Amino acid sequence: MTNLSTHIFYSPNKIILGMEAASNVSDELSKLGGGRVLLVTDPGVVQAGLISQIENFLKSNSLDYVLYDAVEPEPPDGVIDRGAEIFKSEDCGLVLGIGGGSSLDVAKGISILATNSGKILDFCGIDCVPRKGAPLLLMPTTSGTGSEVTRVLVLTDEKQNVKNVVFTPHILADVAIVDPALTLSMPPRVTADTGMDAMVHAIETYVSMNATVFSDVLAERAIELIARYLPIAWAKGSNLEARYQMSAAATVAGLAFGSGGLGAVHALAYPLGTEYHMTHGRTNAIMLPHIMKFNLSGNPAKYARIAELMGQDINGYSMYEAAAMAVDAVKELLDTIKVSYNLSDYDIPTKDLPKLVDGGMKQARLFVPNPRDLIREDVESIYEGAY
Ligand SMILES: [Fe+2]
């Protein structure tokens, strides 16, 4: 199945990948025009000692900065709006986002509010932002979201208690610095959750109806790297090769889904995040094998290829048998890194099922590119199967 529509491939102007790549931060900020920097992050990144390291780079190059470390997971809209107020009141000129997906997404939001008047909720939707944001440099400290290379930010609409997105090329980073050394302090659970988010990006975009020649090549490589190196990074956090390959894979998966889009895994994972405050990566990991099983008939050839990329020996099996082996491969990976894919293991009462189904249906925009159509009954039985 080839997607014959016209493709546009977006990416940041510059991606710097490598051990110790973070030392380029001052140089790159200066090249972006200088000015006062708003450093956007969350308290966990500060506690891990990563910010003091970056602050030292900035200080030694006499770069003036203001720290905004109030980012929360699944960032509420108010966190972005308050950051933008600080950007303006402190007379900043550039935004530097450091952290996991939430910090990078908040940095992206502040960047556009610096040049477009309004609150962040005014800009939710596809291409609803008139002007490019303030210069933006993003540095991930996890290997998962790929947010450093995408043109989407995800936020929580506090009043509605629902996820929303701002989707615009105007939030693409001017520079993404991907330094695997910044991910070394991730504990195994965070390594597993964020790594599975990257795997979901790669698999969802690979089988998406919107997959492109660009997303295919990137997704295949990401699936292969994550299957091989995520268990190693989980087992031995100090393994530099595994950390390097996971950082590379997460960024590559981000570029892939930036071109090919996501699907039903993210849709059905979102309500778990908003209702039970579980991490984005964990909720995706839980839903992945269940959605894959449901989706197999939508693109058996590509699921068979996923099985092969994940190390399954598909020789001698039919395409349909091989496709089903992709689900087994994902379950084996999840078992290895001790991530349960059963909702019953997460204290989510079965009486909450209708609430989950309602939440999943609110994300129906993500059903459009999914390789198999879903109706409410399907959503219901997928969640039931996940218990
Ligand atoms: Fe994701």
Image (cartoon, grey):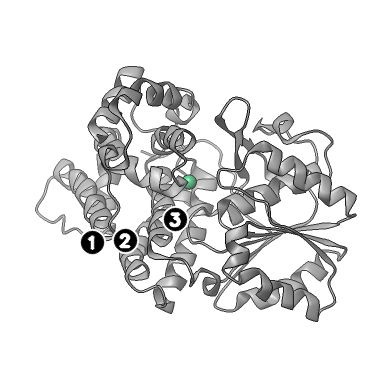
Residue lying furthest bottom:
60
Q: In which quarter of the view is residue 48 placed? A: bottom right
Image side of residue 186 versus residue 334, left or right: right
The tag on residue 194 is 3
> Contact, CB < 8 Å: mark 2 with mark 1?
yes
Packing grade of label 2 (10 A; few <14, some 14-19, many >=20) is: many
What SS does tag 1 mark?
loop
Q: Earlier in the sequence, mark 1 or mark 3?
A: 3
Query: Up-down: is 290 above or below 33?
Result: above
- Residue 363 percent location from the top left of the image: 48, 27
Query: Up-down: is 253 above or below 272?
Result: below
- Residue 77 percent location from the top left of the image: 67, 37
- Residue 149 percent location from the top left of the image: 60, 55
The tag on residue 227 is 2
Three-letter amino acid code at disc 1? Gly
Judge depth for marks 3 and 2 and give the one in front.
3
Query: Up-down: is 299 above or below 312?
Result: above
Judge depth for marks 1 and 3 and give the one in front.
3
Q: Could you tell me if residue 373 is visible in this image?
A: no
Three-letter amino acid code at disc 2? Ala
Classify the position of the C terminus by image quarter.
Answer: top left
> Contact, CB < 8 Å: mark 3 with mark 2?
no
What residue is pinned by disc 1?
A: 311
Q: Is ligand 1 within 8 Å of the beta carbon of the residue shown at mark 2?
A: no
Estimate the spatial distance between the alpha carbons at disc 2 and disc 1, rounded to whole Å.
8 Å
